[in-house]
Amino acid sequence: MYSFASIDWVMSVVAIGDQHFVTALRLAGVDRREAHDIREVEQIIDELLERGECKVLIVPEELALQLKKKREELFRERKIYPVFAIVPGLGGAVGERVREIHQLISQAVGVKLKLGEE
């Protein structure tokens, strides 16, 4: 039988986004924080980090693009948490995320990979 080592980890998943995005995830039992602009999102992330309350942060793809500098800052500080789970927003996937993933894979393997028409 599978069981979680700690229920605290399950409860530390937080979704941040607009009203529609967080409402959709609320139905799945995810804690959520509604935000209206990038400054408010960054404040929420800082509060969650300060309290150590968040292991996984679910954000819509559009918001992840705006949070790129914040995510890079956390990476440079060697913060393990939160893990950013980036999902397509209600409007569907954005092409910029595909390019970002391509660049990360290229860095990881140490060669410039070709993407589609490149």
Image (cartoon, grey):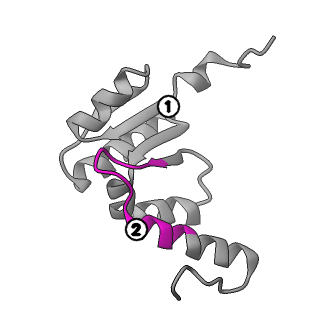
User: Circle 2 sits on which residue?
Assistant: 95
What percent of the width, then of the height, locates residue 108? 71, 73
**Relative depth, front residue between 17 and 114:** 114
Residue 110 vs residue 16: left or right? right
Q: Which mark is residue 13?
A: 1
Numbered range of the magenta stretch: 86-101
Image coordinates of residue 19 in percent, x first then y, are 21, 35
The alpha-carbon separation of the residues under discs 1 and 2 comes to 26 Å
**Tag 2: Cα neighbours inside 10 Å, few (<14), some, or many (≥20)?**
few
Alpha-carbon neighbours of circle 1 within 10 Å: few (<14), some, or many (≥20)? many
Location of residue 31 with respect to 104 vertically, above or below: above
Tell me which amino acid carries mark 2: Gly
The one of 26 and 5 positioned closer to us in this rendering = 26
SS label for mark 1: strand
Place of residue 44 in the rendered image (x, y in percent of width and height, measured from the top left) = 33, 42
At a point 33% along the width and 62% down the height, the residue shown is: 66
Residue 94 highlighted magenta (yes or no):
yes
Depicted 66 relative to depicted 6: above or below: below
The residue at the point 61 percent across, 84 percent down is: 114
Picture residue at 34% right of the left edge, 40% below the top: 16
- Which quarter shows the N terminus? top right
Badge 1 or badge 2: first in the primary sequence: 1
Residue that sits furthest to the left in the current view: 36
